Image (cartoon, coloured by chain):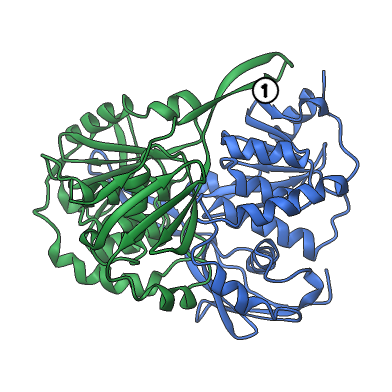
Chain colours: A green, B blue
Amino acid sequence: MKSIEILAQPLAPVVPLRAHNNHGQAQDIYLVREQPLTIYLNRIEIVTLMTMGTEPAYLIAGFLLNQHLIETIDDITSIHVDWTVNAAAVVAKNVHYVQEKTQQRVVTTGCGQGTMFSAVMEKVRAQVQDLPPLPTLTAEKIYALLRQLNDKNSVYRQAGAVHGCALCSDTQVIKVIEDVGRHNAVDGLSGFLALETPAHPPTIMYTTGRLTSEMVIKTAQMGLSVIISRSGATSMGVEVAEAAGITLISRAQGKRFLVLSGQKRLQQ
Amino acid sequence: MKSIEILAQPLAPVVPLRAHNNHGQAQDIYLVREQPLTIYLNRIEIVTLMTMGTEPAYLIAGFLLNQHLIETIDDITSIHVDWTVNAAAVVAKNVHYVQEKTQQRVVTTGCGQGTMFSAVMEKVRAQVQDLPPLPTLTAEKIYALLRQLNDKNSVYRQAGAVHGCALCSDTQVIKVIEDVGRHNAVDGLSGFLALETPAHPPTIMYTTGRLTSEMVIKTAQMGLSVIISRSGATSMGVEVAEAAGITLISRAQGKRFLVLSGQKRLQQ
């Protein structure tokens, strides 16, 4: 953990609800918690994220990094989350460019709605040569990872309605984060990677969600060289992966998957 | 159709790709198209949406309405989409408040990342009394709708990686829109409803995607009283539905569903 003052209680991920089934019978279920969290960066209101609230510090750090509101994690002095007012106060250095950014971008991030695609793609292309030693994968290694991941999507199994993302080495699941949106989950992983120093360095990002351009860009920004999704990918998701030298694997479930880019990294 | 000058070619929804399966064998598949579309409102750059591009005018109109960048569809004079530069030029009246909004909102919309929750909730509560005559639903009617919808998710069946939303009466599917994100799909329906006058007025919104607060808010803004999702819902999705008097049905597939709010509208 970096020397950042962090004060952030995790929330319980689910809340109970009495529902009714198609026969009109009452049925007690759990719903995923969705909670607003407004981030203030040096007292300036930046965004309201809707989150499950289980790992708020990672989410905040990852969001600020992925949106380029801070350049490096070391710029952050403190993160204080106060759920009684659903607000997070972040103190950081070198954020003089916030004002400029707020004037450029009206509606950005998330779910294909609003991106900073062109600016970020330049960075992604420049990053290709910096990728860590490339793992060589086999189908068996991928099946083994999928089996491990299957045991770890605890909120999804209890309540559904979440997406999960995970950092993995080629043999181990290092960190799983679930949240109400796939963008929050991957931002959480970015924050984890920036704040912690995992014993095994990750090379793979796994997600239950679809791989649109933004998801692949965020993975490239983490310096990972393989993305595996249980779902599918879009045309631009694959284009970005090609440009960034990332192996993109979709439809990965059980003992099946499709390689959409970077087949060379797969050993038969 | 309103008297708006619309110039907007639809794009083909999928693009071909040669992929490789887990045995290393080449396999020709289709990918969902993901294309940037930058919206200029009276020459001011508003947002870049990532979209499949099949119904751009509906998407643009719905986005502007749902983000309150225009108050009513009649404010729009023309929508011109030019895919050679991935840009849309919208001319509209009464958008003098754009500048003010761009300064307030840094990162908004989509996938739980950034919302205008508190401001919009006031409007939603005020809207409750304006809901159209409430349909009474039966399980059989819902099963019949689900069967109809099953035949209409054409892009999903071909390429996956999209979400679909639909406007329905209690007996008929009126309009289906698929896109790379559930927010685009529901914005497209808002635009359709604003621009066209369907013979059967819709009362139900169906979606393949999760029902987070924003999805429910957008449905309330369309004045619909029932939401049905194949997926789950979040705690705040249900809270908003309760506040807006909306019947929220989740996990609707085949002959099963769960009613999470507004059970009174279901007849046994």
Where does residue B217 sit, x and y in percent of width and height? 68, 49
Left or right: B162 as drawn, with respect to B94: left
Q: Quadrant of residue B268?
A: top right
In front: B3, or B217?
B217
State whether residue A131 is above or below residue A32: below
* Residue A139 showing in the rendered view: yes
Question: Could you tell me which secondary element the residue under label 1 belongs to?
Answer: loop
Judged left or right of residue B76, residue B253 is left
Q: Position of residue B255 (x, y in %)?
A: 67, 22
Measuring from the top left, give residue A88's x and y in whole percent: 42, 51
The quadrant in which the N terminus of chain B is found is: bottom right
**A58 to A222, vertically: above or below:** above
Instruction: Report whether A144 appears left or right of B258.
Output: left
Identify the residue at image location x=50%, y=27%.
Answer: A159
**How many marks do you count on the picture?**
1
Please report the residue visible at 86 percent of the width from the left and 36 percent of the height from the top.
B135
- Place of residue B189 in the rendered image (x, y in percent of width and height, measured from the top left): 70, 56
Q: Nearer the viewer, residue A100 or B192?
A: A100
Q: Given the image, what chain letter belongs to the residue carrying mark 1? A: B
Does A195 sit left or right of A179 as displayed?
A: left
Q: Tell me the residue that label 1 is attached to.
A: B255
Q: Residue furthest right?
A: B133
Residue depicted at x 26% and y 58%: A77
Asked whether the viewer can see residue A210, the reply is no
Q: Residues within 10 Å of mark 1 (few under 14, many from 20)?
A: few
Residue A146 falls in image quadrant: top left
* Furthest residue in direction bottom, as rendered: B43
Q: Amino acid at mark 1?
A: Lys
